[in-house]
Image: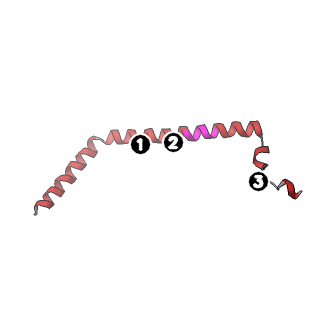
Amino acid sequence: MHRSQVIGILMVLVGVAVLILLASFIVSVLVTLLQLLVVIVGVVLVLGGIAMFLFGRRVWRRGPWGWGEHPAST
């Protein structure tokens, strides 16, 4: 075996050992990121629900991009 092959195998073994030792840390980081994403989605849904409750469909019909017919066309 060449020296570079031995070094490559050692690097793979050390990398696997590091990943095994840090597996719980990596999983906790992923779980934290997913929880943060869920919190952000929840806040957006709550704010959107409050906006829909307070303003109704009036906000969504304003402007040329509204869901209903354009006011000038009636």
Using residue 46 as the reference point, say whether residue 66 is left or right of it.
Answer: right
The kind of residue on which mark 3 rests is Trp
Residue that numbered label 2 is attached to = 37
Find out whether residue 43 is within the magenta segment: yes
Q: Which mark is residue 40?
A: none
Q: Nearer the viewer, residue 55 or 72?
A: 72
The kind of residue on which mark 2 rests is Leu
**Which residues, given as a range, are shown in magenta?**
40-45
Residue that numbered label 1 is attached to = 30
Q: Is residue 49 above or below residue 8?
A: above
Using residue 15 as the reference point, say whether residue 47 is left or right of it.
Answer: right
Pick whichever of labels 2 and 1 is earlier in the sequence. 1
Q: Nearer the viewer, residue 57 or 28?
A: 57
Q: The N terminus appears in which quarter of the rendering?
A: bottom left
- Residue 70 at x, y percent in the picture: 82, 55
Give the class, few, some or many, for how many residues have Cα within 10 Å of label 1's Cα (few <14, many ≥20).
Answer: few
Residue that appears at 22% across and 53% down: 12
The kind of residue on which mark 1 rests is Leu
Q: Secondary structure at mark 2?
A: helix
- Residue 11 at x, y percent in the picture: 20, 53
Residue 57 visible here? no
* Dominant secondary structure, magenta: helix
- Residue 20 at x, y percent in the picture: 27, 44
Residue that numbered label 3 is attached to = 67
Q: Alpha carbon of mark 2 to alpha carbon of mark 3: how far?
A: 29 Å
